[in-house]
Image (cartoon, helix red, strand yellow):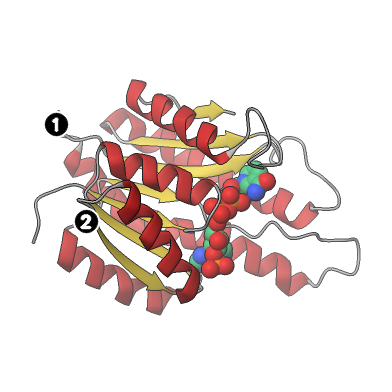
C-alpha cells in the first residue's frame, strides 16, 4: 500500500470536477480515485489528471454513486490499493430541468439519493478515518461538497435539484457542526450561478483556484464563488 496521500472524487466530469481534481492532484495528492457512471468519460478525466500531474496514480470506477453495493466494492478496491482518502471531494449531481408537474417523483428521489443518501453513506464510511487522521498535524482531512445558491434561492425550473441541494447543505452543516471540532474540514463550495469557461468568475479554473485557496487557509465551512 502506498503511503502517499489519496484524493477521492465522486462525480468526476469535465467541468468543476476536472478543474478541482487536476489542481488538487498537482498540489497535494498522488493517489487519485475517480468515480462517475460513464467509463468512457472517466478515461478522459484520468488522462486530464495524468497530464496535469505526471506523478499521479489514478484509479477509475464506472459506478453510479447511488448503487451502494457497487460503490462499496469499488471503494474496498481503492482503499486496498491506495489507503483511505485524506480528502473526499463530493461533486456528483445532475443539472437537469424539472418542470411542475411533468417531473416524475422518482426523478426527485434519484436526485435525493445522488446528493444526500449516497453522501451520507460515504460520510459514514470515511468520517471515522478522517477524524483519526486529524490527530496528526501533517494531515488535512476533509470532506468537501460542491453546492450552489439553490438551497437558499431555489429556481422553480430546477425545483428538484434546488430541494435536494438544500437537504445536502443541511446534512453537510450537521456534519460540520459534529466533526469540525475534531479537526476535519467539512464544508461546501458554493458555486452561486451557472458555470461556463466564458464566465469571468464562475469558470472551472477560477472555481478550482478559489477552492484550493479556501481549503489551504483553514477550515471555514463555505467558500462562495
Ligand atoms: N454546472 C453548473 O452550472 C453548476 C453551477 C453551480 C453548482 N454546480 C454544482 O457543481 C457540481 C458539478 O459540477 P459540474 O456541473 O461542473 O459537473 P462536472 O464536474 O463536469 O461533472 C460532474 C459529474 O458527476 C457525475 N455524476 C452525476 N451523477 C452521478 C452519479 N449518480 N454517480 C456518479 N457520478 C455521477 C457525472 O458523470 P456521469 O454522467 O458519467 O456519471 C458528471 O460528469 C454539482 O454538485 C452541481 O450541483 C454546477
Is the residue marked 2 within 8 Å of ligand 1, measured from its CB?
A: no
Find numbered disc 1 in the image and state the secondary structure of the residue it sits on: loop
Q: Residue at coordinates 58% horizontally, 42% vertically from top-left?
A: 147
Q: Is residue 199 above or below residue 92?
A: above
Is residue 13 in view from this perspective? yes
Q: Residue at coordinates 60% horizontally, 37% vertically from top-left?
A: 203
- Find residue 114 and report its horizontal and vertical position in percent: 56, 63
Q: Which of the 4 image quadrants contains residue 100?
A: bottom right
Q: Nearer the viewer, residue 59 or 95?
A: 59
Quarter holding ligand 1: bottom right
Q: Residue at coordinates 27% horizontally, 31% vertically from top-left?
A: 183
Mark 2, residue position? 84
Find numbered disc 2 in the image and state the secondary structure of the residue it sits on: loop
Q: How many residues crowd mark 1 within 10 Å: few (<14), some (14–19), many (20+)?
A: few
Q: Residue at coordinates 79% horizontally, 53% vertically from top-left?
A: 158
Q: Which residue is the extreme one toward the right?
A: 101
Q: Is residue 74 above or below residue 155?
A: below
- Mark sitting on residue 12: none
**First-in-chain label (1 vs 2):** 2
Q: Is residue 223 left or right of residue 68?
A: right
- Mark sitting on residue 138: 1
Q: Is residue 146 above or below residue 66?
A: above
- Find residue 163 and report its horizontal and vertical position in percent: 71, 50
Amino acid at each position: 500500500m502506498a503511503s502517499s496521500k489519496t484524493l477521492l472524487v465522486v462525480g468526476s466530469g469535465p467541468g468543476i470536477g476536472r478543474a478541482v481534481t487536476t489542481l488538487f492532484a498537482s498540489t497535494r495528492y498522488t493517489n487519485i480515485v475517480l468515480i462517475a457512471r460513464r467509463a468512457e468519460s472517466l478515461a478522459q478525466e484520468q488522462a486530464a489528471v495524468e497530464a496535469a500531474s505526471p506523478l499521479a496514480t489514478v484509479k477509475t470506477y464506472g459506478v453510479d454513486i447511488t448503487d451502494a453495493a457497487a460503490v462499496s466494492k469499488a471503494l474496498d478496491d481503492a482503499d486496498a490499493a491506495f489507503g483511505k482518502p485524506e480528502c473526499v471531494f463530493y461533486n456528483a449531481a445532475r443539472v437537469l430541468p424539472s418542470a411542475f408537474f411533468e417531473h416524475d417523483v422518482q426523478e426527485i428521489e434519484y436526485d435525493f439519493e445522488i446528493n444526500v443518501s449516497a453522501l451520507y453513506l460515504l460520510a459514514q464510511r470515511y468520517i471515522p478515518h478522517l477524524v483519526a487522521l486529524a490527530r496528526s498535524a501533517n494531515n488535512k482531512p476533509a470532506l468537501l461538497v460542491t453546492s450552489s445558491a439553490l438551497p437558499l434561492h431555489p429556481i422553480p425550473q430546477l425545483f428538484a435539484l434546488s430541494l435536494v441541494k438544500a437537504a445536502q447543505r443541511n446534512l453537510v452543516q450537521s456534519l460540520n457542526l459534529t466533526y469540525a471540532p475534531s479537526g476535519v474540514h467539512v464544508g461546501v463550495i458554493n458555486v452561486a450561478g451557472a458555470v461556463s469557461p466564458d464566465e469571468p468568475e464562475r469558470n472551472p479554473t477560477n472555481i478550482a483556484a478559489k477552492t484550493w485557496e479556501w481549503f489551504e487557509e483553514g477550515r471555514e465551512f463555505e467558500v462562495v464563488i
